[in-house]
Image: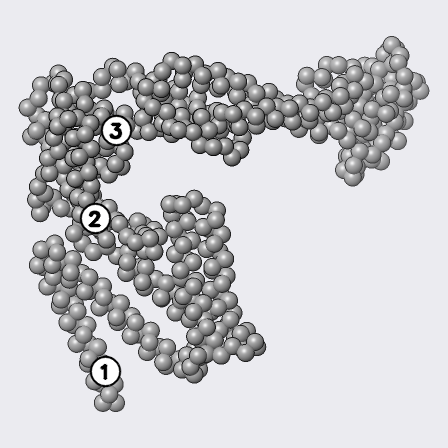
Amino acid sequence: MIVPMARVRIYGPRELLDDATRVLYALEALHPEALPPELTARLSIRDRRTEDREEAHERVELETLYDKVRRSLLLLPHPKVPREAVPSLELLRSEETRRVVDVLFQHVEALSARRKEAADRLALFVKYEKMVSAILPLVESVGDSENIEMVGLTIAREQQAVVPLLELELQRVTDGMAQLFSTEVDEHTVAALVLYGRSDAAKVRSLLWDRNLSELKLPAEIGRLPLRRALAEIATQGERLPNEVRDIDGSLSALAVQRRGYLEALAEALSGRLQQIGARSSFFRTRYSFVISGWIPRGVLARLRSELEAVSGGRIVVEDVAVAAAEERRVPVQLHNSRLARPFEVFVRLLPPPVYHSIDPTPLLALFFPLFFGLIVGDVGYGLAVAVFALVLRRRFPPGSRVRDLGTVLLYASAVAVLFGVAFGEFFGTLGEHFGMRPLHPRLHRLKSMPFFLGLSIGIGCLHVFLGLALGIVNAVRGGHRAALRHRAGQATALAGLILLVAALAGAA
């Protein structure tokens, strides 16, 4: 149903604005609106609403603190930790809280940066693992010599035939003073190692360049080392880095166990306080007083008055402002339905909300959508398949999300589809007949009783149309719209007459 709303104006001294804001935030019921110009135009420019320096300073400090807390939570793992109590406003503003968060944030960020660097290096070295394991034995078999240089090559497997030709070319340009060793790395790559004298380095490099052969590309930080040392360094780091990543992960997990509960409570308190400041900045204030205008559910009005009375000792006044009929279209619409019908609000929210004092269509959707869906599908197998899909949606999305509500709606509809499937004797069409499934009544066989189901469909359609016209009439009466009332009543009368005429002609025939 559509919740009855009350327009309120809250008046009080400026120093109690913070207390009033906390009460309104805790109630989560106010829909604020701007005050009418005739009330604000009489104030001087100096007295108009402004965000004072203290409030702006607090906002900046809390936003900075909240950003550090939020980034720390994003970087830390998610172990199951007990939830801590939400800290008070005084604790949020304290210098000790900022110091603790700063130290914690710097520690988490440093660990995360080290882990990312180690993980990136590990991912890079993993790409060279097969190449190193293939070439390193060749390099180690050469032995140490100051006059011998070496270069590693990578050759595509389909170009493997170039290896003996390359060896002949190397022998030619170095007068037989070069050697080439090759080995398979994997099904796509062959690795080769070229040994040559230092005096022939220019000739060998030129030949490799002319033949467009790919020299083994090493990571930048070790590419300047001699090949033997570079390959050995890759092998060493490939063994060390996994342990380093595991150690850092362990440190982050231990820190999350110790501090994640505190950070989550702090984030909740900071988020709430920043929302309060944002809401408070939209309220009308002068140097000595404040005025808050907005809408709340009428059922909350008494509680709002009592809680403001408790925090202000009667110094805050709540006025229930009368609403003219011409203003009803401006009233915010809030829906409240039973637990079973509430998921069907997902369809209502896809369209503009119903007008205040009109009929909430959610209960009707909760009744007719599963009924029509079940009648159309009418199959046990397909109903169960939809139910599985609906359960997956409910499991994957959090409570209150639209997709989860859609899953709940489909779950209801699938249950009705299964019931109709039992009545029609259908399981994935006629497959159920092979297992002995039969309609509960011969007229419920959808393939053999087409005239019956055609008439049923027409009857349900007419009922639905008349229901829509009836709802339009009720809304017109509630809103005092006489033209709309006459229009809807005329449509209903004409449709009823048409149906009676068709029925009479059918009976005469």
Image point (37%, 45%), residue name: 400
* The one of 144 and 169 positioned closer to us in this rendering: 144
Q: Could you tell whether 203 is left or right of 428 in the image?
A: right
* The one of 311 and 173 positioned closer to us in this rendering: 311
Q: Secondary structure at mark 1?
A: helix
With respect to residue 77, does 417 lie above or below? below
With respect to residue 472, does 128 lie above or below? above
Residue 484 % position (x, y): 12, 59
Which quadrant of the figure contains the C terminus? bottom left
For label 2, count other residues whose C-alpha is less than 10 Å away and answer few (under 14), some (14-19) or many (20+): some
Q: Secondary structure at mark 3?
A: helix
- Residue 174 makes an appearance in the image: no
Image point (8%, 44%), residue name: 324
Residue 155 % position (x, y): 78, 31
Marks 2 and 3, how far apart at CA: 23 Å
Residue 472 % position (x, y): 18, 60
With respect to residue 18, does 397 lie above or below? below
Image point (57%, 20%), residue name: 111
In the rendered image, which quarter is residue 234 located in?
top right
The kind of residue tagged 1 is Ala
Q: Secondary structure at mark 2?
A: loop
User: Label for residue 503?
Assistant: 1
Residue holding disc 3 = 22
- Residue 64 makes an appearance in the image: yes
The kind of residue tagged 3 is Arg
Image point (38%, 47%), residue name: 402
* The one of 371 and 171 positioned closer to us in this rendering: 371
- N-terminal-most mark, 1 or 3: 3
In the rendered image, which quarter is residue 441 located in?
bottom left
